[in-house]
Amino acid sequence: MNLTALSNLALTPVEAMTMTEEIEVTDASHAIAPSWLDTQITAACDRIAPVWPLDRFVAVNPFHGLRQAPFQEAAAIMRRAAGARLYMPRAYYREQIEAGRITPDDLRQAAALCGSQLEPDDIARATASEAHPAGGVPLLTAVLDEMDADRWSSFVVDRISHHCAAYFDMGQATWKQPWQGMSLYASWRRFAALDFSTTMMGQGGMRARVKALPENPRDCIRSALTRLGIPNAAVLDYLHAALMDVGGWAAWTRLLRWQAELVGESDATIEELLAIRLAWDLLVYEHKARPELTRRWRAVCAGLAQAPVVPEPAGQADAGPSTDQGIDHLLLTAQELAYQRRLIGQLTAARGDDQESPVRPVMQAAFCIDVRSEVMRRSLETACPQAQTLGFAGFFGAPIEVVPLGAAQAKPHAPVLLSPGYRVCSEIQGADGARSDRALNTQRRRMGISKSWKAFKMGASSCFSFVEAAGIWLYAPKLIGDSLGWSRPVPAPNDLRLDAEAASRVAPSLDVPAHDHCCAAPETTLGIPEEDRLSLAEGILRGMSLTEGFARLVLLVGHGSTSVNNPYAAGLDCGACGGQTGEASARVVAALLNEPRVREGLAERGIAIPADTWFLPGLHDTTTDDVRLFDTAILPSDYAEELAEIRSWLKEAGALTRMQRATFLRLDGLSGRGLETRIRRRSRDWSQIRPEWGLAGNAAFIAAPRARTQGIDLGGRSFLHDYDWQTDADFKTLELIMTAPLVVATWINLQYYGSMVDNRRFGSGNKVLHNVVGGAIGVLEGNAGDLRVGLPLQSLHDGQRWMHEPLRLSAFLQAPEAAIEDIIARHELIRQLLDNGWLHLFRLGESGAEIERRLPGQGWISVLPEGL
């Protein structure tokens, strides 16, 4: 809602007569029932999407909390409550129309889908003017900002962020906050009562008033709403706006609730954060109370009491903000139709024969469904036409968490939608207990020395002398090397400085470790028990649609990324592995499928793996496009010649992939060795703010036999999951695909979408200005402000043009209609995403010309090759 419009509302004579300077007048304006308010608090907190820490940063749908609302209605909610955008500026769509990427036919079909009577020319003319600027529910501090020179909104956010950074610190701070054992709200009351920063704002008396705030967070929320006079009709939006004002920390505390809910528990930290934000509004109001502020605030509350505007269908109104959103939604739909038209043209032109070749492939390689793997798969099939590639989620179906050798903490290697069921620990394969103990002790000593050295560097009494006396001499060579790109690749976490032979044998083990450094959490099992291995292996192979026709060597290729000085490095690793690389998952599953007992059991269940088939793990570096193979030392010697051939094919595929990415990286003039050298140097360049554009451009998800997409240049924009419904008797694999990989792909897609359409609220701004907070919690843009979420602008823009196209994901499934609809009916999350327009769904028939689109409420509509 527009603040200026609210503040200009005329007061009635009765309001003017009853208004006084006393806060108590507002106090008695209305009563809020506790049970009703509890519902509103829960609803406001549920609107917030979680954000994961930097060391396991994963793509998150920033609109996850609004998935139960239609896309257009969610856009209205975000616009009304937080002034946020869910659509690109009109100028962007005008450029697409003028460039011919959106055609008049696309506009005409978009109008038909959106129920609009507008003609293409009318829609195109609408792009000449921008939509009315978004307003947002004005918080008390925002109203005061318009009246005073002091920036209270920024001050409040800074103070909350300062406290949260100290409270949630994950190891960065040398001096710990003294109230760690308390709840967030209780610790803030202690902190704020001693904080003299309000004195510098001319309000020294606030510190004493903090002590009088209710001890219970919900009581504080109720007191603030009552004393501020927020009308009941606006309570939910006001609470939502308050959380969005500290949206980064709200997302962090929402993660704590998310993680608790995964194990059947609850967490109220986000409610405590909400109480803190509202307490600040109340404190500021009471200490800045004067007639003009009271009058202005009453006018705002009168405007908030009006019923929220419900968005109208596109093109059916003549004026007003709902028409703005209708036009914007129509333009978004037209751009999506333009992409879908091109992709459908490729799919219908491709051969639809999905029958397996009777000839045994010379090799098989299962890659992650990641869009970057699509390019590598195509390159490998070019380098070796007799090879078969497959697409499967990068955790390869193993819900594990991994404790690296020498570490104390486990990290999940599974989609964040799942709770890991097994904890596996890394060990030196074949090493005796004494050698392993020496490695562990070495690591612990190194960690202790590192901790002491950090304390010395960061200590209040030693940091300045360290910089002046030793800093330049110790760090000058590294700074020069980093600046010139001479640095070596970043060592892996928990690197034990082992010799090369021993380091090559460090791998996660299926068995329970012999060392006490690796303990299972209550909700996980240590190691993978033998009684679980057969069923787990069967599920993995059926999920990959790989139950026959095995090659002698089957590669399981996870993926990761190489970059330095990059807080968002984990965001370029595998989203299916919880923001980790896919190395551990690939090695665990390969070991599982190579076990003789597991194979015997699989044969009894109808999956006969030839005795000469060997599963080999690998890792695709999506920055350099190298593929590294692991555990080759235990490969039988008679595979040596084939292994050498495979290495040469992978090397050739990497070169082809780098050539395809050269244009994207603006390295068009380079090729061969020069291109490879330049890309490797970029991956080690500490000043490189765009090490790779990762998943920029992602737009489609395809689950079908590889034959359906083989030979098509999908431009690195499609998540590719191999799936053959004819081998999926009970459609359990289809159900798994739709409820896990498809949802993860949707989250990735919407994170890129949100970060682009409104980077201020759903992105993280300028990467150059980022400072890491709390060790790995997240980043600030600069040295103050809210915790940032989403992607930096450099992940979306190359300085001259957008590298991403903000489209909702288009999913294509080759499966029977009845099976798809049955799964949708049984899974609320999938139903919400589809019926509310967060995701487009198409069904591929058995022949190339059969493609249908699912329209909510209308069923499946045939899509012709020449248009939609």
Image (tube, helix red, strand yellow):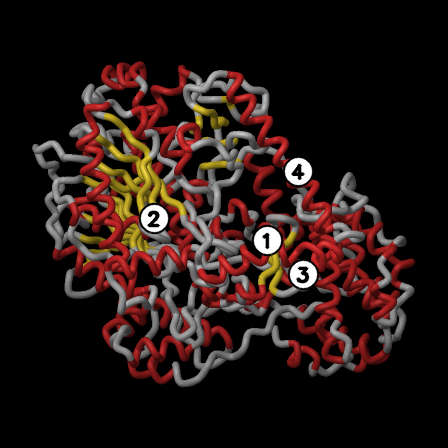
Q: Residues within 10 Å of mark 3 (few under 14, many from 20)?
A: many
Indicate which disc, 4 or 3, sits on the residue closer to the N terminus. Answer: 3
Indicate which disc, 3 or 1, sits on the residue closer to the N terminus. Answer: 3
Q: Quadrant of the C terminus?
A: bottom left
Give residue 65's position: percent from left, percent from top: 53, 52
Q: Residues within 10 Å of mark 4 (few under 14, many from 20)?
A: few
Three-letter code, disc 4: Ile
Three-letter code, disc 3: Ala
Q: Contact (CB < 8 A) between labels 1 and 2?
A: no
Q: Which residue is mark 4?
A: 449
Q: Contact (CB < 8 A) between labels 4 and 3?
A: no
Give residue 645's position: percent from left, percent from top: 18, 38
Q: Contact (CB < 8 A) between labels 1 and 4?
A: no
In this picture, residue 321 sits left or right of residue 3:
left
Above or below residue 861? Residue 286 is below
Q: Which residue is mark 3?
A: 242
Nearest the viewer among 842 and 270 is 270
- The residue located at (28%, 42%) in the rendering is 391
The tag on residue 92 is none
Q: Which residue is mark 1?
A: 778
**Cα separation between marks 1 and 2:** 24 Å
Above or below residue 68? Residue 801 is below
Element under disc 2: loop
- The residue located at (76%, 43%) in the rendering is 183
